[in-house]
Each structure stands twice: as C-alpha cells, then as structure tokens.
Amino acid sequence: MHSSRIKKRVFLAMCLLALPACAVASKEGILPLSSFRLELDGIGQSGKIIVEGKGDKDGHLLSLKVTAFGKQYVVPRDRLAQFRVTANGVRISYEAGYRETGGRTVYVQFQMGFTSGTQQEAIHRGVRNRACQV
C-alpha cells in the first residue's frame, strides 16, 4: 500500500511538470517606429520643440532631427547606429539647467516598451540652448 501512494505522488508530480509544456501563451511584440514627428509647445526660451525621424523595419533609428531654441540639430547616422534599442516609444523632458553648464536642456529618450515593462536608452543626451550634446 505504501508503494501505491508513492506511485500516485510520482504520477501527480509528473503531470504537474508537464502542464507548462501544454500551456499556450500569446507573445507580445512591438510595433517599431518607422516615421514620426512630435511637436511640443516648449517652455521658456525653448520655443516650439519638434522631434522627428525615421526608423527601419527592425526599429533602429535611421534619422533624428530635433528643433529647439530656434535651431535644428541633426544626429549623425553613425552616432544613431551605436544605439541598439528597438524603439517603439519616445520620452521628451526639459531641464532648466545651470548657466555654467550651458543652460536649459531638452532631453529625447527612445524606449522599447511592453505592457510588462520598458527598456530605454538615451539616444540624444540633450539639446542645449547653445550646442547639441550628442
């Protein structure tokens, strides 16, 4: 009788281990950015802020242009190639900054997000009112 209980427990354990193999789950994918243009009213001296660019079918950025403080900043393609995030989202923020470090800064951050979480990488470290820091 004792060996019968052990056999039942072993059988039950094997059935439980086999369940995940039988389960079917949907895998979430991303829709990468292929072309985008975001316009913001800006704040203070930044004036209107425009972030625009293009990506390839795999979500890697091919071009990126940021307009702020009355100037256009184009990120070189070789610089864009250094970043390995497959982008499907953009985050834009602003910092008042310190006069000693160049003043106000606009930050553009590209990210790959799912309902379960987000990975991000700063592609463009900031657009300052004096120079583009890439």
Image (cartoon, rainbow, N blue to C red):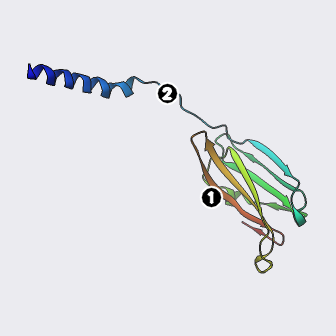
Residue at point 74% right, 64% down? 126
| Dot in front, 1 or 2 | 2
Task: Name the residue at 83% across, 72% down.
Answer: 130
Bin the neighbour count of mark 1 within 10 Å (Cα to Cα): few under 14, some 14-19, many 20 and up: few
**Which quadrant would the C terminus be assigned to in this image?**
bottom right
Q: Is residue 14 left or right of residue 19?
A: left
Percent coordinates x, y for residue 53 in the rendering: 78, 49
For the question of whether residue 100 can be seen, the reply is yes
x, y percentage for residue 37? 82, 47
Residue 68 relative to residue 81: left or right: right
Q: Residue at x 85, y 50 (%)?
A: 39
Q: What element carries label 1?
A: loop
- Pick whichever of labels 1 and 2 is earlier in the sequence: 2
Q: In which quarter of the image is the N terminus?
A: top left
- Of 65 and 69, nearer the camera is 69
Mark 1 residue type:
Gln
Q: Mark 1 points at which residue?
A: 82
Image coordinates of residue 112 in percent, x first then y, are: 63, 46
11 relative to 108, above or below: above
Query: As shown in the figure, which amino acid type bears the numbered disc 2?
Result: Ala
Q: Would you identify the image quadrant in which residue 83 lies?
A: bottom right
Instruction: Judge whether residue 69 can be spotted in this image.
Output: no
- State whether residue 129 is above or below residue 62: below
Instruction: Identify the residue under disc 2.
Output: 25
Above or below, 62 relative to 18: below
